[in-house]
Image (cartoon, helix red, strand yellow):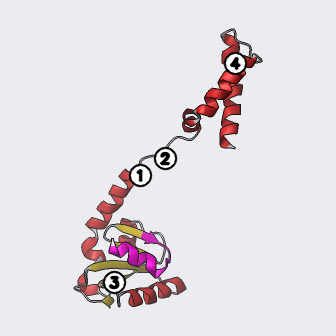
Amino acid sequence: MIRIFTAGLLAVLFTGAAQADGVSSTDPAFAAELRAALLADPEPVWRAFNPPAPDDREHIDRDLARLAAAAAELFDPTATRIGSPEAEHPLALFVRPDCPDCERAKDDLRQLSENIDLRVNFIDITRQADLVERIGVDMAPSYVLPNMIVRGHVPVAVIGKYLSK
């Protein structure tokens, strides 16, 4: 469908250019050639109407720098609430009061800590606004790992997979 729309749009746009060059837009040979060219390679037209998304690498690098700068505060072993302070995999769970999904996330992480060497710190977003702003967390629960932020409650298997990478 996109190819047909794109081809039709280009045909309309090129009609004026073709008439300026002395080729009639009703010339069957021109129409057939244009159609064949657009059907054979619609990629340039697609790119013209759908420019690539900006490179997210800059945003990713900025987020990783924020996490690295706050790592001592996020993953402080003395603040461990689930697991052992010496555990291999640190995680900070951003929570807020009266949050059913936050309680589910805590329960999930307790269960996960039975199978993965995990330590979890809880960070109350209503009490640590400065840290919340520096990290860029905008909801609870949010799972913060040393190399990523996962916003919203997700199945425990997903967090387990992220931790095993």
- Cα–Cα span, label 1 and label 4: 42 Å
- Cα–Cα span, label 1 and label 3: 29 Å
Circle 1: residue type: Asp
Circle 2: residue type: Ala
Q: Where 86 sits versus 165, above or below? A: below
Q: Can residue 126 be seen in this view?
A: no
Labels 1 & 2 near each other (Cβ < 8 A): yes
Does label 1 or label 4 sit earlier along the sequence? 4
- Cα–Cα span, label 2 and label 4: 34 Å
- Cα–Cα span, label 1 and label 2: 8 Å
Please identify, in this view, whether the residue under mark 3 or under mark 4 is nearer the observer: 4
Q: Quadrant of residue 134?
A: bottom left
Q: Does the magenta stretch include residue 9?
A: no
The residue indicated by pointer 2 is 53
Labels 1 & 3 near each other (Cβ < 8 A): no
Main SS of residues in magenta: helix
Labels 2 & 4 near each other (Cβ < 8 A): no
Residue 56 - label = 1
Q: Residues within 10 Å of mark 4 (few under 14, many from 20)?
A: some
Does label 1 or label 3 sit earlier along the sequence? 1
| Quarter of the image where the N terminus is located | top right
The residue indicated by pointer 3 is 120
Instruction: Judge by depth and name the residue closer to the eye, 139 or 129.
Output: 139
Q: Of helix, strand and loop, which one carries label 4?
A: helix
Circle 3: residue type: Val
Labels 1 & 4 near each other (Cβ < 8 A): no
Residue located at (66% from left, 17% from top):
17
Q: What stretch is highlighted in magenta?
A: 150-164
Q: Does the magenta stretch include residue 154?
A: yes
Labels 3 & 4 near each other (Cβ < 8 A): no
